[in-house]
Image (tube, helix red, strand yellow):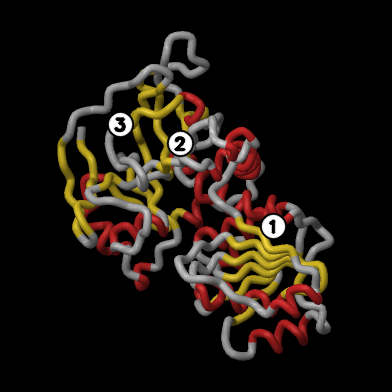
Amino acid sequence: MKALVCDEPGRLSLVSRPEPVRKEGEVLVRIRHVGICGTDFHIFAGKHPFLEYPRVMGHELSGTVEEAPAGSRLKAGEPVYIVPYLSCGACQACRKGLTNACCNIRVLGVHCDGGMADYVSVPEQNVVPTGGIPLEDAAMIEFLAIGAHGVKRSNLGAQDRVLVTGSGPIGMSAIIFAKARGARVTVMDTREDRLAFALERLGADEILMADEGAESEADRRTAGEFYDVVIDATGNAVPMQRGFHFLNHGARYVLLSVVRQDITFADPEFHKREVTLLASRNAQPDDFAEVVHQIEAGRVPTRALNTHRGRLEDGVELFAQWSRPQAGVIKAILEV
């Protein structure tokens, strides 16, 4: 089979390698579409802390069942998407149902080879029928589920005033699912094009330029009350720390972003407001199901999100192009 391999930072190659052998309890999936996300671009740039090269990337995956175990609920040819978090099922996190935070988690395309290839073999519980969702759209379910999980963690509702900081794909997913719960959503970023997209295509209520006057502008707009929920999706320690300035009393702050640096904040202000600080990691099965529900309900503008398309065979050239900020990628998808 063909596979797109990141040999080392900045270098990809299209290679031929043996098809995976399906193990007991696994499903062999013929990959049809692969979404490219920030993690893949970080791997390509040599910035991912949990990776060894060479690596077949790809964890946003859809395809068709090639071979399933005897008696499986899945049938050959059935359209499916893949949950890329391979959990052990036995650790203390898994015993609590926190498979997204498994102590021994292996993520396809990061800790082990992923789906930028013709085939992948994964445990049956990680393979889910798409229903009526097109396979191209199904390749976006995973990144959308990350935002859905963060919104779920916040427990926000229609009564809440929400600020999403960072309007890349993960921030966009948070906007979509916060709006699906009826919240009033403000989006803050430095990029005018992303802010315009959030207003015009995602239903955001307000935008806020992340300049030096953002705090005073938010103070003015909210009559000094600021926001009930702040969701950070910037992937940068400086704005993550700045997010504490936008919290009202009793607020919840959800960190979708993860960075290698320490995050600091003013403890007296944190305590005075009795703020709840929440980490949000990966997603859980019900988050994937929520994404499918909202896509079926027409609340996710999948065509607008999928800005760039190409073939796996052209991936070496396309990846270099799409990794540049001026390419304007929101979500790029490779067809296999």
Disc 1: which residue? 178
Left or right placement of residue 110 versus residue 85 in this view: left
Secondary structure of the residue carrying numbered label 1? helix
Q: Residue at x 33, y 41 (%)?
A: 112
Q: Residue at x 43, y 56 (%)?
A: 331
Query: Which mark is first along the chain, 2 or 1?
Result: 2
Q: Nearer the viewer, mark 2 or mark 3?
A: 2
- Give the quarter of the image for residue 210: bottom right
Residue type indicated by callout 3? Tyr
Amino acid on which the number 1 mark rests in the picture:
Ala
The residues bearing labels 2 and 3 have C-alpha atoms spaced at a distance of: 17 Å
Q: Quadrant of the N terminus?
A: top left
Could you say where residue 332 lies in the image, as x and y percent from the top left?
39, 54
Q: Position of residue 87 (x, y in %)?
A: 49, 36
* Left or right, residue 154 beside residue 199: right
Q: Quadrant of residue 289?
A: top right
Mark 2 falls on what kind of element? strand
In this rendering, does residue 307 appear at all?
yes
Q: Is residue 323 above or below residue 113?
A: below
Q: Which residue is mark 3?
A: 119
Identify which amino acid the numbered label 2 is placed on. Answer: Leu
Distance in Å between CA atoms under marks 1 and 2: 27 Å
Residue 325 higher or lower than 84, as above or below: below
Tell me which numbered mark, 2 or 3, is placed earlier along the sequence. Answer: 2
Determine whether, in the image, residue 39 is placed left or right of residue 221: left
User: Mark 2 packing: few (<14 Cα in 10 Å), some, or many (20+)?
Assistant: many
Question: Which residue is depicted at the point 32% across and 47% down?
Answer: 57
Residue highlighted by disc 2: 86
Q: Earlier in the sequence, mark 3 or mark 1?
A: 3
What whole-number distance in Å separates the C-alpha atoms at marks 3 and 1? 35 Å
Circle 3/circle 1 CB separation < 8 Å: no
In the image, farthest residue toward the front: 92
